[in-house]
Amino acid sequence: MAAGNDERPLITAIVGGGQGCEAILRMVKEDTLGRFRMSIVGVADRHSNAAGVRYAREMGVERVTTDYRDLYTIPDLDLIIELTGSATVRDELELSRPRHVTLIDHIAARLFWELHQAEEAIIEQRSKDFAIQREIEAELVRTRAYLQNILDNAPVMIITTDLDGQIVSFNRHAEACYGYVAKEVVGKPVTVLFGSRAEWEPLSKGVKQGRTVQDYETTRVRKDGSQMTVSVTLAQLKDSAGDMIGTVAMSRDITQRQLLVDQVIQNGRLAALGRLAAGVAHEINNPMAVIAEIAGYLEDLTEHGPTVKRRHLDRELQEGLPKISAQIRRCRSITSRLLSFARQSEVRMEVADVSLALDEVLPFLANEARNAGVQIHRRLTPNIPRVSIEDLQLEEVFTNCIKNAIDAMSTRGHGNIWLFSEQKDGRVILTIKDDGPGVAQEVVDRLFDPFVTTKPVGKGTGLGLSICHGIVKHHGGDILVDSEPGVGTVFQVILPVHYETGTNDDPVSGC
Amino acid sequence: MFCTVIKREGDTMDKDRVLLVDDEEEFVRALAKRLGARGLNVEVSGDGESAVEKVKQRDFDVIVLDLAMPGIDGLETLKRLREVNPDLQIVLLTGHGSIKSGVEAMKEGAVDFLEKPAEFSELLAKIREASAKRMLLVEKRREEQVKDILRDRGW
């Protein structure tokens, strides 16, 4: 290998113009990178029509011959590769070659060829692996874009925080609802969105303990300072190893719904007022009918003047007029009762007594309960403190809850309702328990949504319980429901104890 | 108008026989006097049960019935009265807002109803109307009876 380390390519000739020859020629030709520093300048084969010979001619190899000895005259020939596979040819070449020409016989050539093939295979495999890698990366990019798309187009606010409560992501819906651009709030404490900073601590604590906060209704503040009511579901954000790395919150803006519920409550109050007015009109109509007839009778007598004896008329007047006065007194007592009731609710608007409210409500429901075959058992604790709610509203709540229980049992035709009251941690709890048919958990979950009803079409509007819930929530209380199909339902109306302003020690007992 | 309707000393058999049923004592008493002065033969009952007893004892043309009463209510009274005598013409007096029970009572066979407090002239008109209906009914019955008798005898 005289020119082994030189820069110039090896001047090479091939003996044996078969397929091996063609393969080497092609390899050299296709090696555009110039990795082979080899220049094939001659090909010899006895068959001038062999595949390699033909290809050599096509390629324009300088010396294509049928006698290998012609190759020896090639100037600066470095190497002859013998590809005939014939030991005789190899031996002849070995003996006849000029001494400066190196000979590689077909065995060595095969080794080199196989090495080359192996390398090719490795390269091919590598490029395949590379293509797969690229495919995976592209897939990753697509997946990420897809997930981002979901986040961006989800019709719900999705906000994630790190463990310290700093905002990590803020989706497009959140941007739209809050009026912030994500960049403005990412990295800031999530409490910038809160009405009250104190709210975060207990929330995040619960979530860190593994609880998921479900449909929690609260107030949030938009960029412009306005408030919105949201329903939040908050859970742990975990990494792939399952360790908590922050929180993820999904919230819906329910301001509109809240307004609707408020309106429903207002309408409920109007309806209650309407019923009251109807009751009053009804009560006043009776004495009015009496007055009308007595006055009418007296009119009859006076109109009839000449034919009625003076004494008779006097007597009838003496009898009739006090009767009219009595009926007027009756009307007055109705209106004055109404007025005092109105005044009372003006002054002590937000105080009610659970037992008294039940006293008011139960007689109205007695008929319905009897018709449904339902027995109502009072198990009230005496002298329980009064609660902070308008008494009329409390009556409305009790009426709805008890009526609901009665209705649930009316088709069956028998049942029991127990009423318990207790005081606990500054709250008064009225428990309404029935042994009715109960409802499934899915229904319990939606029980306070407006327009949810299990009653036949036309029987219930599904508004009663949502009104109750609204009223109680509005007064800082809560209504809890537990139900088991086939066992019964328990409603708990929970309201804060009313503390008389000025005397902040003891809650005032109802009397 | 008072003089035109009054038939002072007629045969009691010609007078419309009216029973007022209402628990409001002063109301029925004054109403009875006024109707009496207009030529009607009026009796009063303070509750449903005594009204049913009265109807069992003698015939009335028209009953004026209050729907809201203690004891058996107006609707029940109505049913029992019609059991005793299906020809009875019953005019209802209902309190405001009990239109529903009024409608129900009409289904049970009442001929008319008025809301309390009612205009006296209107009530009087309805009583007379009901009484006329009753008369027609009685005449029709009589005619049918005559026809039946004639038919029985081969006419």
Image: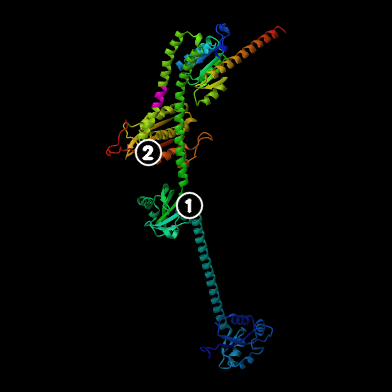
Q: Is residue A172 magenta?
A: no
Q: Chain of mark 1?
A: A
Residue under label 2, please give it.
A494
Number of labelled discs? 2
User: Can marks 2 and 1 be said to lie on one chain?
Assistant: yes
**Label 2 secondary element:** strand
The image position of residue A454, as x and y in percent, is 50, 37
The image position of residue A95, as x and y in percent, is 59, 92
Label 1 near label 2: C-beta < 8 Å? no
Q: Chain of mark 2?
A: A
Which of these two is toward me, A285 or A355? A285
Specify the principal SS of the magenta part: helix
The image position of residue A277, as x and y in percent, is 45, 29
Which of these two is toward me, A496 or A367? A496
Amino acid residing under circle 1: Val
Q: Is residue A334 magenta?
A: yes
Q: Residue furthest right?
A: B155
Q: Earlier in the sequence, mark 2 or mark 1?
A: 1
Local packing at callout 1 (Cα closer than 10 Å; few below 14, some 14-19, many 20+) is: some
Mark 2–mark 1 Cα distance, whole angstroms, equals 31 Å
The image position of residue A477, as x and y in percent, is 38, 40
Residue A441 visible in image: no
**Label 1 secondary element:** loop
Q: Which residues are magenta?
A: A330-336
Residue at position x 39%, y 55% in the image: A192
Name the image quarter holding the C terminus of chain A: top left
Local packing at callout 2 (Cα closer than 10 Å; few below 14, some 14-19, many 20+) is: many
Residue under label 1, please give it.
A156
Compared across the picture, whether B101 is left or right of A427 comes to right
